[in-house]
Image (spheres, helix red, strand yellow):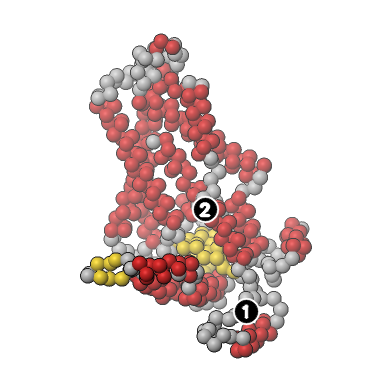
Amino acid sequence: YQVYIYHRVQFTPTTTNTDLRWFLRVLGIGFGVSSHLFFWLLFVISAYCYLAFKGNEGRVKFLLPADDEDALIVSFKALLVYCFVAKFVHVAMLIMDQCSIDIFLIDWERPKGNIMALIQQQQFMQQHFRAPNDDANDMHLNIISCWRKLFVANEWNEMSIYRNISPRFTFFVFLSFLVGLQYEYFSLQKPMALLAEHELDVIPVSIVYKFVVCAFFFMLIFAVSYLYCFFVNDRILGSDPFMDLIDLTCLANISIFVLDTRYHGFYIHGKSIYQHADTSLQQINQNIENEKKRLCKARGLVPDKDVFEIFVSTQFRQQYDKIYREVLQFEMSKLTQSLVPKNNHFFMLNQNEQQSKDNNNNNNLLLSKQLIESSKLLSMFLSDFIEKTCPHQWEHRELMGAERIFGALPDLSIERNSIFYEDVLHKFKSKLMYVGLQYDVTLLLIL
């Protein structure tokens, strides 16, 4: 089923290509599914063996082999090792997916005052105050500040690594139970949980029972921590930081457009209902009061709906790729110019050239003009797309029936327009943020 979902959001019937990348993706999905299956299978069987051995008031109904070289114990260890390797590969694949998404911030702010007068002033400055060796577009009038966009980008970066479960606290409580309260002795091959001092060097430890005890306490701590953060910390003692991020985008008049696969992504609509977001603190406070008292229209792309799961059309994706094609080629050419061929091999520049290259490292950190122009062009394209003023149209649909449980998977081969679904469950957190990997990382730590 996960392979089917990957096909629907990454390929179309006319562009399906079963290459090496597709094979590695299917292999990673298979590792993830099999690691979950075998982990819970081992846990259930081990828990049954544990309860059958220690849960009958000293009357043993089931006894594990005492020899570690027994076929059952060897098979258990082999499956445990496979679960660890498979889960490690799966987590690595998920991290790579989150590191390769396309994120674009759309600034809806418009210049204040008479726009034509500002443009004339800019042209006057370019004609009379431009240096002789400067290009025609070097001097320009900065009408709109970029600090709001930088602030939203910084908050997005912080939320991308946010975790509501602390590994340090989890390990501290885990070791407190096992070592401090001596619950680790529950894994001894003895029917009763009580232990005498002279039995420590006599009774061996069972790897099966140890796995059950460690997995049980680790998952118990994880579940309690998650429920506390979900019901208490994010709703009573504080607020959900991801909801704060959505409110921040509306306050900053910035929208976030994300594509995690070729035809699938998420959209957070942050366009303000007011004329300007770059204003005084008193005006911002007054705007918030008006929203509380419902003295203004509801915010959102659709009234009271800010977050959407989107499926873009093939025509939209082609236009999106076309805008970035030239700038990607330009950046690749800059990368290849840092290496010079010699005797059919690539070697680094000589010492003098390397020194001049080091002096220009700070300049390389700056954004190229072509990249900035492509960003402006893409911003215009996406803003026109959202406002339905370009040939690529979108339509909003409601989730129906089983789509509310399993998610929407429209057939893009027969859809002419892009489709927006309200992200009711806020799946963008699990798809785009580290918080969505906590369950998989927890299983990896247990293994």
Question: Could you tell me which residue is drawn at 43 percent across and 20 percent down?
Answer: 185
Q: Is residue 240 above or below residue 184?
A: below
Indicate the amino acid at tag 1. Leu
Question: Could you tell me which residue is drawn at 31 percent across and 58 percent down?
Answer: 21
Mark 2, other Cα within 10 Å: few <14 / some 14–19 / many ≥20 = some
Question: Could you tell me which residue is drawn at 64 percent across and 63 percent down?
Answer: 252
In this image, 145 relative to 177: left or right?
right
Q: Position of residue 327 (x, y in %)?
A: 43, 73
Residue 221: numbered disc: none
Indicate the amino acid at tag 2. Ser
SS of the residue under disc 1? loop
Query: Is residue 423 in view from this perspective?
Result: no
Which of the two residues, 4 or 222, is positioned nearer the viewer here? 222
Residue 160: numbered disc: 2
In this image, 196 relative to 248: left or right?
left
Total marks shown come to 2
Q: Position of residue 321 (x, y in %)?
A: 42, 71
Q: Is residue 66 above or below residue 429?
A: above
Q: Position of residue 439 (x, y in %)?
A: 46, 42
Which of the two residues, 343 or 391, is positioned nearer the viewer here? 343
Which of the two residues, 440 or 293, is positioned nearer the viewer here? 440
Q: Mark 1 or mark 2, which is nearer the start of the sequence?
A: 1
SS of the residue under disc 2? helix
Mark 1, other Cα within 10 Å: few <14 / some 14–19 / many ≥20 = few
Q: Nearer the viewer, mark 2 or mark 1?
A: 1
Q: Which residue is mark 1?
A: 141
